[in-house]
Image: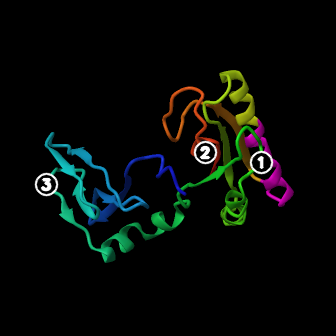
C-alpha cells in the first residue's frame, strides 16, 4: 500500500544542549517508519569524520568521537518536544482501474474509506493524486486517460467532503510504470492512481 518512505532516506535529530556555559550539539540517527536506516557521515570541528549508521547511535558535532548508543530515555529527554512536533510521514495508496476506463476496481473502491481516514487525520492535509496507465494505446491517449483517472479520484474525495490545503492532480500516463512492460501490454498493476497524503 505504501510506496514511498519519507522524502529523506534517513531521519535525523539535531539538538543543542547546554552543559555549563559551553553548548554541546550532537546528532542521533533514527529509524525510518519502515524500520530501515541510512547513514550519515559527520565531520567534527576537528576535521575527523565518523559514520553513523545504526538507529539510535549519536555523535558529537564539536568533536568526532566514535558514535555511541543513545537510550530511549535520553532521546525522549533531549528530543521529546522536537519529535512530538514532527508531522506524520506521508502515506500513499494505490487505487487500481479497469482496462481502458476511469472506473475503480471494486477492491480499490473499498480502499477509499482508508484514504479518507488518513486525510481527515491531518489538520492541513496536502494531497497528491497521480494518474497512471498501462502501455496499451498511444502516449497522448494514455496521458489523457491518466488525468481522467486522477480527476475521478479527486471527485470521489471531494464528494466525501475532503477539503485539502493543497490538492495536486497530475498524470504520468504510461511513464513510471509500476511493472515494466513492453509497449501495448495490458498490465492491471499499471492502471492506477497513486494518492499521497502529507
Label drawn at residue 149: none
Secondary structure mostly taken by the magenta-highlighted segment of the chain: helix
Label drawn at residue 65: 3
- Would residue 197 be visible to someone looking at this image? no
Residue placed under numbered mark 2 in the picture: 188
Secondary structure, mark 1, is: loop
> Magenta stretch?
148-163
Q: Earlier in the sequence, mark 1 or mark 3?
A: 3
Q: CA distance from mark 2 to mark 1?
A: 13 Å
Considering depth in this image, is 3 or 118 the residue closer to the camera? 3
Q: Position of residue 56 (x, y in %)?
A: 28, 64
| Side (left or right) of 67 relative to 156 | left
Q: Residue at the spot x=23%, y=46% of the render? A: 42
Q: Residue at the spot x=64%, y=45% of the render? A: 192
Q: Earlier in the sequence, mark 3 or mark 2?
A: 3
**Quarter of the image that includes the N terminus:** bottom right
* Image height of 14 relative to 73, above or below: above
Q: Residue furthest right?
A: 159
Q: Position of residue 97 (x, y in %)?
A: 70, 47
Q: Residue at the spot x=53%, y=56% of the render? A: 2
Amino acid at each position: 500500500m505504501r510506496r514511498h518512505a519519507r522524502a529523506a532516506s534517513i531521519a535525523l535529530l539535531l539538538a543543542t544542549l547546554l552543559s555549563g556555559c559551553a553548548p554541546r550539539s550532537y546528532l542521533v540517527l533514527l529509524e525510518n517508519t519502515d524500520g530501515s536506516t541510512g547513514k550519515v557521515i559527520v565531520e567534527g570541528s576537528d576535521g575527523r569524520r565518523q559514520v553513523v549508521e545504526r538507529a539510535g547511535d549519536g555523535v558529537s558535532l564539536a568533536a568526532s568521537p566514535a558514535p555511541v548508543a543513545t537510550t530511549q530515555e535520553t532521546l525522549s529527554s533531549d528530543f521529546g518536544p522536537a519529535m512530538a512536533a514532527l508531522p506524520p510521514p506521508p502515506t500513499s495508496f494505490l487505487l487500481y482501474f479497469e482496462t481502458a476506463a476511469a472506473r475503480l476496481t471494486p477492491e480499490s473502491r473499498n480502499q477509499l474509506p482508508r484514504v479518507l481516514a488518513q486525510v481527515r487525520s491531518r489538520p492541513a492535509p496536502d494531497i497528491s493524486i497521480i494518474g497512471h496507465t498501462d502501455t496499451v494505446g498511444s502516449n497522448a491517449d494514455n496521458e489523457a486517460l491518466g488525468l481522467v483517472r486522477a480527476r475521478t479520484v479527486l471527485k470521489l474525495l471531494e464528494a466525501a467532503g475532503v477539503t485539502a490545503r493543497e490538492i495536486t492532480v497530475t498524470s504520468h500516463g504510461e511513464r513510471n510504470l509500476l511493472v515494466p512492460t513492453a509497449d501495448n501490454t495490458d498490465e492491471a498493476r499499471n492502471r492506477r492512481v497513486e494518492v499521497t497524503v502529507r
